[in-house]
């Protein structure tokens, strides 16, 4: 885990190394200051002059200033290193997620990925900041202070040694008890965020069915469950401070008692006032270091769970990979399914598609119709290799899609979904997702062909109209037409419309199909539809049923011989006058 996360340091390695070095000098100076003060106290006790006091004072000021410079510098480098690591981790995770197949994304919950890129990365950032500064500073302070305490107080310093095991055992127990709680809590974080995401996304449905109270109660229960785990962890962590304070005061009492006795009994020969004061100072330094160290270890223990979750994302390998020698050129828009079967996971009990054999010539217009769950969308998703077949092969332009460079393949296949997404930005910026180099004239032409110019021209800012995230400020039909225009700008070899005109009226639907026939006659067009009117003029229509091809034919042929198609057509055209022919 540490090795994998360390790969994200990159340009921040130097500041990461500089921080412990600067902290070392800072600690060394801090530990020498009590020693110099002890010497000054002894000089004053011996009746030194003002010149000696001023000399020691100047030395102390210089040491304090130098320690301050090293401390501030280490803080700056530490902040740069930790924030830089967080930036690179988010970047690496985001880039990795972009390479995922749908199967990989299905493995992770979307809300979980968001939590990992935000909360988990923040935890790792905080832990790394503590690691390169506080976790370096505290042990060094402990060691240096202990050495100086022995130098100044001799055997009296053994009092500090006696308390270290007590603190170590207490720290170990706290960490062991809290780590499982944090592990459980982060899993519940994912569920909580998933609930939030689902509720916000379905806000219209929640309000339409007046389910606000139900959703509030559901969220409150999840939040309460998460609170219980964190509360239990905090209760355990609360023992940290009292244990430290108890050990601190016990040690101070012991040092003051035995130290005062030695000073008085030996008349300052074995231990003088300056040395006693420095031992007390070193004692505070040691115990404070242990306290800081315990707090750091607790945070690091919590971040350890976050680190594991981050590494899960970084080490996940996409189920779809480019071949060693990919094909970049797509000859034409022909499509072949050869004995294709597919299931979404290896453990799935049933095939989503089975025994698919199909040849589609380049430039053909193919309609696909079938009931809900007949795997219409699954069929077309194999063409652009959003999933890989379980058996058989899918060919585009006569080449197995697994032999293509994935970017080249997907640039040659444009897909418009029923619930396609628009991004925040202007209409023109959204359309240029299809072709980033498209001219204004090309954008207007594509919008005209998709019948989107009808409403775009009515907006005050026309193509500069700002689209809210997800296209929240346009209707469903307008969104679909913009997505069709975006796909047309790609000028693809294959265009797939997956129920993408369901929100437009039949007249507009017909105009869009006519425009596509005239604008991209050589492009293979696959139209998935619920309405038979949307596929009546197709060269052929595929009827899907239960993950298999039930029949293939023209509109007239299917009306005569296929019961499924005839039932759909009849239900949508109650008069059924064509049946009489």
Image (spheres, helix red, strand yellow):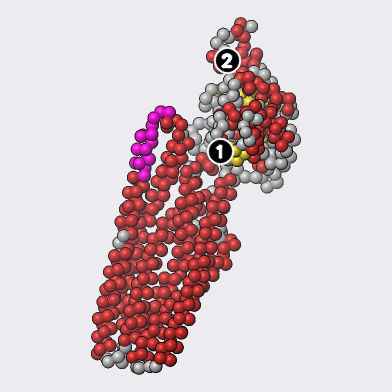
Queried whether the magenta region covers residue 220, the answer comes back as: yes
Residue at point 53% right, 31% down?
351
Does residue 568 appear left or right of residue 169 in this picture?
right
Which of the 4 image quadrants contains residue 341?
A: top right
- Where disc 2 sits, the SS reads helix
Does residue 186 appear left or right of residue 442 in this picture?
left
Q: Main secondary structure of the magenta part?
A: helix
Which of the 4 image quadrants contains residue 402?
A: top right
Out of 235 and 528, give the one closest to the viewer.
235
Q: Which residues are magenta?
A: 208-223
Residue matched to label 2: 569
Queried whether the magenta region covers residue 232, the answer comes back as: no
Out of 119 and 212, give the one closest to the viewer.
212
**How far apart are the alpha carbons under marks 2 and 1?**
38 Å
Position of residue 70 measured from the top left corner of the image (x, y, whole percent): 50, 73
Give yes or no for contact between labels 2 and 1 (Cβ–Cβ under 8 Å): no
Residue at point 47% right, 63% down?
129
Instruction: Name the disc covering residue 311, or none.
Output: none
Residue at point 41% right, 84% down?
36
Which residue is outermost to the front?
460
Residue at point 56% right, 56% down?
88
Residue matched to label 1: 468
Out of 192 and 314, give the one closest to the viewer.
192
Which of the 4 image quadrants contains residue 431?
A: top right
Crowd tier of the residue under label 1, counting other residues whose Cα lies within 10 Å: few below 14, some 14–19, many 20 or above: some
Nearer-N-terminus badge (2/1): 1
Which residue is outermost to the top?
580
Q: Which quarter of the image is occupied by the C terminus?
A: top right
Q: How many marks?
A: 2
């Amino acid at each position: 885990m540490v090795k994998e996360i360390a790969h994200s340091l990159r340009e921040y390695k130097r500041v990461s190394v500089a921080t412990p070095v600067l902290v070392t000098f800072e600690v060394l100076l801090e530990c020498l200051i009590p020693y110099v003060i002890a010497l000054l106290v002894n000089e004053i006790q011996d009746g030194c002059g003002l010149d000696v006091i001023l000399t020691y004072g100047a030395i102390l000021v210089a040491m304090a200033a130098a320690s301050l410079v090293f401390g501030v510098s280490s803080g700056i480098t530490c902040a740069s290193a930790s924030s830089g690591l967080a930036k690179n981790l988010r970047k690496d995770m985001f880039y990795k997620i972009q390479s995922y197949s749908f199967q990989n994304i299905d493995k992770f919950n979307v809300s979980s990925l968001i939590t990992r890129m935000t909360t988990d990365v923040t935890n790792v950032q905080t832990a790394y900041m503590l690691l390169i500064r506080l976790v370096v500073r505290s042990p060094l302070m402990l060691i240096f202070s202990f050495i100086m305490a022995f130098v100044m107080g001799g055997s009296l310093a053994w009092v500090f040694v006696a308390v270290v095991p007590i603190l170590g055992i207490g720290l170990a127990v706290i960490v062991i008890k809290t780590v499982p709680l944090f592990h459980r809590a982060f899993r519940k974080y994912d569920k909580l965020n998933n609930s939030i995401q689902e509720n916000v996304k379905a806000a219209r449905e929640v309000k339409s069915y007046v389910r606000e109270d139900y959703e509030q109660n559901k969220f409150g229960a999840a939040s309460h469950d998460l609170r219980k785990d964190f509360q239990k962890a905090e209760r355990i962590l609360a023992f940290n401070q009292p244990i430290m304070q108890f050990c601190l005061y016990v040690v101070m009492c012991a040092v003051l008692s035995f130290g005062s006795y030695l000073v008085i009994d030996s008349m300052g020969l074995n231990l003088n006032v300056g040395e006693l004061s420095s031992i007390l100072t070193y004692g505070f330094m040691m115990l404070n270091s242990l306290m800081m160290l315990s707090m750091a270890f607790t945070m690091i223990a919590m971040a350890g769970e976050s680190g594991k979750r981050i590494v899960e994302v970084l080490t996940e390998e996409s189920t779809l990979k480019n071949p060693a020698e990919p094909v970049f050129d797509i000859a034409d828009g022909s499509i072949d399914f050869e004995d294709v079967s597919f299931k979404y996971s290896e453990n799935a009990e049933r095939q989503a598609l089975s025994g698919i054999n199909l040849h589609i010539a380049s430039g053909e217009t193919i309609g696909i119709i079938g009931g809900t769950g007949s795997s219409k969308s699954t069929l077309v998703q194999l063409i652009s290799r959003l999933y890989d077949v379980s058996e058989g092969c899918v060919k585009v332009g006569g080449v197995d899609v697994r032999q293509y460079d994935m970017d080249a393949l997907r640039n040659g296949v444009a897909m418009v979904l029923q619930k396609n997404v628009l991004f925040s930005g202007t209409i023109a910026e959204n359309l240029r997702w299809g072709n980033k180099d498209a001219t204004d004239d090309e954008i207007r032409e594509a919008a005209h062909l998709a019948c989107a110019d009808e409403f775009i021209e009515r907006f005050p800012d026309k193509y500069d109209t700002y689209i809210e995230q997800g296209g929240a400020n346009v209707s469903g039909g307008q969104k679909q037409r913009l997505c069709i225009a975006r796909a047309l700008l790609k000028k693809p070899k294959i265009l797939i419309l997956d129920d993408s005109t369901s929100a437009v009226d039949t007249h507009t639907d017909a105009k869009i199909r006519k425009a596509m026939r005239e604008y991209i006659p050589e492009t293979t067009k696959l139209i998935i539809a619920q309405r038979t009117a949307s596929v009546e003029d197709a060269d052929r229509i595929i009827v899907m049923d239960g993950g298999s091809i039930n029949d293939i034919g023209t509109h007239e042929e299917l009306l005569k011989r296929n019961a499924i198609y005839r039932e759909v057509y009849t239900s949508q055209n109650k008069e059924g006058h064509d049946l009489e022919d």
